[in-house]
Image (cartoon, rainbow, N blue to C red):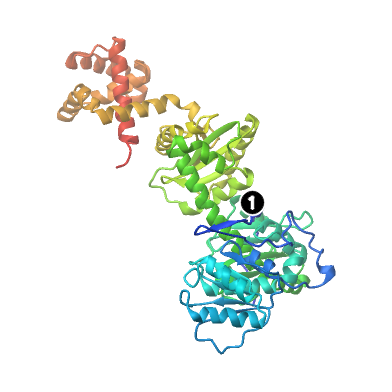
């Protein structure tokens, strides 16, 4: 199938890889029972040589290969050997006469707890020489499953109760069939950056991997492969400009069962694209740039051979990211809310040994009524993905409806470099996004201080969003250290509001406001401008766009009508605070 050309060109992109942080757990605990998750001997650290196994020819997947590829939803409770796996089969209680293939992994679906039907299945499985039997806790608890496996000479595996049988079967089948292609692709499972490089090597074109939300999950960076302007733009944004839900090229790719070719134009290269699926669910898409039309069919063949491997990589990356994000969000939330738990949370987040900490959050500096082309949740995805790329140890999580970002490091130069990168990125996001600012807290040296800093940071966010504070000209970073007077005023205003002090002290200003309302005068506005202009008559006249003599007359009348001595420094300070408190109270009072 061939897609019609588009003026915007087609897919490229940059992104971040989670593969470098993927780990496989040993000694996982399930309901108090310690079980061992098999580790594949092929899962060595680092990125394997793409040609290493190709020279030896295809290799058959063993049980450990298959299970470690599927991930943390499975636990081996009894292992007596590491047999070859040739097929995946589902068995139900009604299938008692069904042939059981040798070297198969059986999925025991719907067997009642501790029932004779499941025991009979284990007996027949042992006689047939199956590679393993997988069951859920509803059928057998870990200890019973281990004992049955040992008794009948069968490897037994426990699946998480919530796992979907059909999706698990699809993943296992993909893992079995992927042996040669995945070995040639040679990337650590879930490392989408390395996998994109492997695809680019085999297909001969720059490659990017995009999820259904439009986020770029991985991209190749081989120096000898050209890219176009669309690729560069998406690299910067870490996301497709157009949503895949409405983009015709994506819709065509989703509808196809294999690869499609999207022609280029005068400014962009063509692309070969394919949807990556698991049991019918689209996990993402792969886009390979085609610079030479004569190589189009070679690219298609190479990409089709790698789709099973791609399914496993995307499944692992997605599972890991979901779990890791929830974990980081929980730990960061506890760290900010409970100072007594801060040290433990910092240790779990692997930041306890850092020399400095900076807490930050993202806010818009646009008026609330402005419409933007990019939805807020896509901006959050885009920025969090980009932050992980430029600052791998950044912890990003949503806490109390704020996108909290915790940075840490060993020396101040690291923060200086990061601040420059933040400014540069947020300036370049325009015009496809609202004006954004990163609001940054103080430099701290103890993690237990972060909770108080987060409270002050949220106040500073409200001030920034309402334009009461702003970044330096040409910048996009608001530093708390540079806006301590405004922050203190806001905190004092909140205290006055909560203790009703404003209600007791405002009558003088209310009298002036009532006088203006009854007579159509402008004494309150004149007084406010005069105070905020530091009692400068010319500045007040300029601010009100009136003659200086008019200002002098109004100030004299104000003092006589309302018994105000504006030469008294205490009266002046009191009026200044009242005007500032009123502004900050109405602007930054916490939402109920």
Local crowd at mark 1 within 10 Å, few (<14), some, or many (≥20)? few
Which one is in front, 489 or 139? 139
Q: Quadrant of residue 174?
A: bottom right
Q: Which residue is drawn at 65% across and 69% down?
A: 273
Q: Position of residue 373 (x, y in %)?
A: 48, 54
Which residue of the protein is positioned furthest toward the left in this rendering?
518
Q: Which residue is drawn at 77% across and 59% down?
A: 48
Which residue of the protein is positioned furthest toward the bottom in this rendering?
97
Q: Position of residue 359 (x, y in %)?
A: 51, 36
Q: In this view, does 348 lie above or below 357?
A: below
Query: From where the camera sits, is residue 22 visible?
Result: yes
Q: Position of residue 229 (x, y in %)?
A: 67, 55
Which one is in front, 354 or 516? 354
Q: Residue at x 22, y 22 (%)?
A: 505
| Quadrant the C terminus occupies | top left
- Horizontal arrangement in the rendering, residue 100 relative to residue 373 (left or right): right
Q: How many marks?
A: 1
User: Secondary structure beneath disc 1?
Assistant: helix
Query: From where the camera sits, is residue 374 visible?
Result: no
Q: In this view, does 579 lie above or below 260?
A: above
Which residue of the protein is positioned furthest toward the front in this rendering?
151
| Quadrant the N terminus occupies | bottom right
Which one is in front, 119 or 564? 119
Q: In which quarter of the image is residue 101?
A: bottom right
Q: Mark 1 points at which residue?
A: 21
């Amino acid at each position: 199938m061939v897609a019609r050309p588009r003026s915007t060109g087609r897919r490229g992109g940059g992104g971040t890889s989670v593969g470098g942080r993927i780990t496989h757990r040993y000694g996982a605990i399930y309901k108090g029972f310690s079980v061992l998750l098999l580790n594949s001997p092929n899962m060595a650290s680092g990125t394997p040589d793409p040609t290493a196994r190709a020279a030896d020819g295809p290799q058959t997947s063993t049980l450990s290969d298959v299970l470690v590829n599927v991930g943390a939803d499975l636990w081996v409770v009894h292992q007596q050997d590491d047999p070859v796996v040739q097929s995946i089969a589902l068995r139900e209680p009604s299938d008692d006469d069904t042939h059981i293939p040798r070297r198969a992994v059986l999925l025991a679906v719907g067997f009642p707890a501790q029932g004779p039907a499941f025991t009979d299945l284990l007996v027949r499985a042992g006689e047939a020489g199956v590679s393993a039997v997988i069951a859920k806790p509803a059928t057998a608890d870990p200890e019973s499953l281990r004992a049955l496996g040992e008794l009948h000479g069968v490897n037994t595996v426990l699946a998480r109760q919530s796992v979907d049988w059909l999706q698990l079967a699809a993943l296992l089948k993909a893992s079995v069939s992927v042996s040669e292609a995945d070995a040639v692709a040679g990337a650590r499972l879930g490392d989408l950056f390395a996998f994109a490089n492997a695809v680019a090597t085999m297909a001969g074109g720059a490659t990017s991997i995009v999820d259904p939300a439009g986020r770029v999950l991985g991209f190749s960076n081989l120096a000898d492969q050209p890219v176009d302007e669309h690729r560069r733009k998406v690299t910067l944004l870490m996301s497709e400009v157009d949503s895949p839900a409405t983009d015709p090229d994506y819709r065509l790719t989703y509808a196809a069962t294999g690869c499609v070719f999207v022609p280029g134009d005068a400014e962009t290269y063509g692309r070969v694209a394919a949807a990556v699926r698991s049991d019918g669910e689209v996990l993402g898409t792969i886009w390979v740039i085609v610079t030479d039309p004569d190589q189009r069919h070679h690219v298609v063949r190479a990409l089709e051979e790698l789709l099973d491997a791609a399914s496993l990589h995307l499944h692992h990356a997605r599972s890991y990211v979901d779990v890791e994000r929830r974990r980081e969000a929980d730990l960061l939330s506890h760290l900010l809310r409970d100072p007594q738990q801060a040290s433990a949370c910092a240790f779990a987040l692997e930041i306890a040994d850092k020399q400095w900490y900076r807490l930050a959050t993202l806010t818009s500096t646009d008026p609330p009524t402005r419409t933007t082309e990019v939805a807020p949740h896509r901006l959050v995805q885009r920025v969090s993905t980009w932050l992980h790329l430029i600052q791998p140890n950044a912890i990003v999580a949503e806490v109390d409806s704020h996108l909290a970002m915790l940075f840490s490091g060993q020396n101040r130069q690291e923060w200086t470099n990061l601040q420059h990168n933040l400014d540069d990125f947020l300036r370049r996001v325009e015009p496809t996004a609202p004006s954004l600012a990163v609001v940054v807290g103080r430099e701290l040296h103890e993690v237990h201080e972060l909770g108080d800093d987060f409270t002050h940071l949220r106040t500073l966010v409200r001030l920034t969003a309402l334009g009461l504070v702003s970044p330096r000209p040409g910048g996009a970073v608001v530093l708390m250290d540079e806006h301590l007077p405004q922050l203190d005023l806001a905190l004092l205003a909140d205290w006055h509001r909560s203790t009703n002090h404003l209600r007791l002290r405002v009558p003088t200003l209310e009298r002036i406001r009532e006088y203006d309302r009854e007579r159509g005068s402008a004494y309150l506005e004149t007084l406010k401008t005069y105070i905020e202009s530091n009692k400068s008559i010319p500045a007040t006249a300029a601010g009100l766009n009136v003659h200086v003599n008019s200002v002098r007359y109004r100030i004299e009348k104000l003092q006589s009508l309302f018994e105000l001595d504006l030469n008294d420094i205490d009266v002046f300070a009191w009026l200044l605070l009242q005007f500032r408190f009123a502004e900050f109270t109405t602007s930054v009072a916490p939402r109920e």
